[in-house]
Amino acid sequence: MPDANDDPKTLALAAAGSLAGGVAAELRVPLRELREGLAVMVEILDHHLNGNGGPAPYPWEETKALRERIAQAYLTGRKVARLNSDLGDAINSYGESSELVDVNKLVEVATNLTRHRISAGTELFIDFGKVPPATVVPGEVVLLLARLVTIAADSAHDVPGAAISVKTRCEQGGAGNEIAIYVADSGKGLPAEVAAASTLGKDVARSLGGSFEGTSEPGAGSVFELRIPAHT
């Protein structure tokens, strides 16, 4: 477990490695399903062609079943490609130049990358408010948010009735409009993990001219709040 006083860049690398490992593990199942689905389709077509001695009209019901298998393989392939692309963008753009981005999109990417950590018994509530764009380094924000959702998922794991809430809002701050990103859970709480993540969160927020707060108490879940200036 990382110490709360660790260097933020070290924590970022650890978060990236953990995220990459988790996504790689998640990809094993859809990749296997894709491979097996395509193998079944090839076997069906080979059997049909060999049995008929060549091309012939294909029965309607079998054609429909084959079409459903192809559609499922396509959707699985899209999921694998999306996860791989999102992970690559998050890690490869860490520490690169700032961009004007849709913050809700970054939150969505981070949540999708960490869904495999959310147990089946944990409810996930996502509430995207209408927020303006912001100038950030996309990879930094995605890695931070993915770390926060992961902590929330671990805190909620095996806690009956636990839920995770992720929401964005545009609010008035001291120097103008701010985009507020909230991640919270009603699980068992992980104070040490939250303290470590707060080191990284404050470093990222400081570079953006914003603020970060993370709190957690045993038995009371965890709450994170990242505030960054809205683009004007």
Image (tube, rainbow, N blue to C red):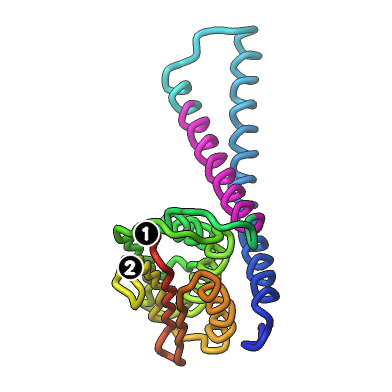
Q: Quadrant of the C terminus?
A: bottom left
Asked if residue 73 lies in the magenta stretch, the reply is yes
Which type of secondary structure does the marked residue at label 1 adopt? Answer: loop
**Residue found at x 59% / y 17%:** 48
Numbered marks: total:
2
Query: Image quadrant for the N terminus?
Result: bottom right
Q: Residues within 10 Å of mark 1 (few under 14, many from 20)?
A: few
Q: Are marks 2 and 1 in contact (CB under 8 Å)?
A: yes
Question: Is residue 11 shown above or below 145?
Answer: below
Residue 196 x/y as whole percent: 59, 83
Q: Observer-nearest residue: 82 or 8?
A: 8
In the picture, residue 105 is in which quadrant?
A: bottom left
* Residue located beneath label 2 in the image: 177
Image check: 200 left or right of 176?
right
Q: Amino acid at mark 1?
A: Thr
Point 40% across, 69% down: residue: 181
Name the mark nearer the viewer: 2 or 1.
1
Q: Position of residue 52 (x, y in %)?
A: 60, 9
Q: Vertically, is 67 above or below 207?
A: above
Q: Position of residue 104 (x, y in %)?
A: 40, 57
* Mark with earlier residue (2, 1): 2
Residue 204 picture quarter? bottom right
Element type where label 2 sits in the image = strand
* Chain part drawn in magenta: 67-92
Let me know if residue 232 appears in the view: yes
Mark linked to residue 232: 1
Answer above or below: position of 42 versus 133.
above
- Characterize the magenta stretch by its predominant secondary structure: helix
Q: Is residue 69 magenta?
A: yes
Q: Name the residue rendered at 39%, 63% in the picture.
A: 230
